[in-house]
Image (spheres, rainbow, N blue to C red):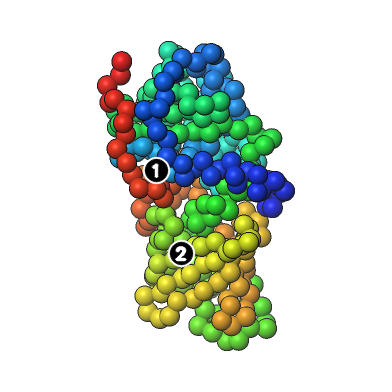
Amino acid sequence: MKTLKLLTGFALVATLFTSCYTEVIVDDIVDNTPQVSLNQLLNSYDLWYVDINATLGTGETPFLQKAFTVSFKNGTVYANNNLVGIGSQGSGLGISVGYYDAYNMILDVHHDIDGLESFDVFQIDSNTIELYNPFNDTSYFLDGYQTSNFDYDFVFFDNIHYFLQEYEAWEKTYTSQMGALNEFDNENYLQFLAGGNDSEFRSSQDENIANPNNILWDYTGIYGVADIAGNAYLKTLTLDYDYFDNEFFELDVINDGKIELFHSASGTVYEFEGRGYIQYLRTATEEGESKSSGEKKRKQKTAKKDNPRDSKRS
């Protein structure tokens, strides 16, 4: 991110993002004839937020399933696939992931790794478009924003469980002296594996390991991140160990590479710093990945529904 807690208009933008959970009724769309060309439409906004929870259909298009935003500029496709650095990479647009052709309300995206994906484009309203992939019968809905009024902080904190997955490991660098002794004092590394909001984590009691690949993981379990009422920037983190009781923390993000965990049971504060940043370029494999995790992709929170779109192009 550019800076944490940067924007003051959180409530307003959060209201805008509530569209993420609104079902789109495709049958109500009557006239798809745009007043501008498709290329002009795509360029009318700096970036398009991928409203993953509005997706219709049971298929998946890899580069859209992982992106938080996509942009179409002068034939180049950009995407914010990571939360680390969101708002600052590529002047807010993210990284280049391919190129595109736009013609007759058809969008062809040539992704650098995933190859060609082709979409029928429908304009839903003044700042919403539908990208319908007839090859997997799935529609993604994108909301347009300018970088000047896009709330990067909201996206970051609303998806913070993905942020935890963007480092090979988190190394404990600070422990407060005021807390009571507890089992977690012995844990020096954490790793959060991909898979959504409730996923696998690992912890280690190793010390001073320069390469995250060489960490010996002592424990595994399931972790979960949850909201704290009244504070959009503070979360809870539960580590559900297989071998002993759960550990419960308040999770605060200090910056893009450092988090603070407050252990409520003991009163101890820990700081962890990210080691081995992973830049995601696609779904199935991550550049420089050494995790034994599955694929990283955004998970749809709403129930998947059949797409009413005709699977055949007219």
Q: Is residue 218 visible?
A: no
Q: Is residue 159 above or below residue 308?
A: below
Disc count in the image? 2
Q: CA separation, marks 2 and 1?
A: 22 Å
Return the residue at label 2.
Answer: 224
Taking the image as drawn, is residue 228 in sight?
yes
User: Neighbour class for label 1 at 10 Å: few (<14), some, many (≥20)?
Assistant: many
Q: Which residue is situated farthest in the left direction here?
A: 312
Residue farthest to the bottom? Answer: 181
Q: Which is more foreground, mark 2 or mark 1?
A: 2
Q: Quadrant of the C terminus?
A: top left
Where residue 44 sits, quadrant-wise, is: top right
Q: Position of residue 138 (x, y in %)?
A: 34, 33
* Residue type pointed to by label 2: Gly
The residue pinned by badge 1 equals 283
User: Relative to residue 251, is residue 205 depicted above or below?
Assistant: below
Q: Is residue 294 left or right of residue 184?
A: left
- Identified by mark 1, the residue type is Thr
Viewer-side residue, 214 vs 65: 65
Helix, strand or loop at label 1? It is loop
Is residue 20 left or right of 312 when viewed as pictured? Answer: right
Q: Disc number at residue 54?
A: none
Q: Position of residue 82 (x, y in %)?
A: 53, 45
Task: Please report whichever mark, 2 or 1, sits nearer to the chain's N-terminal start.
Answer: 2
Badge 2: how crowded within 10 Å, few (<14), some, or many (20+)?
Answer: some
Q: Nearer the viewer, residue 25 or 62?
A: 25
Q: Residue at x 31, y 31 (%)?
A: 308
Which image quadrant is residue 132 in?
Answer: top left
Q: Secondary structure at mark 2?
A: strand
Kindly identify the residue that appears in the image at 52 percent across and 26 percent down.
125
Q: Residue at x 46, y 41 (%)?
A: 22
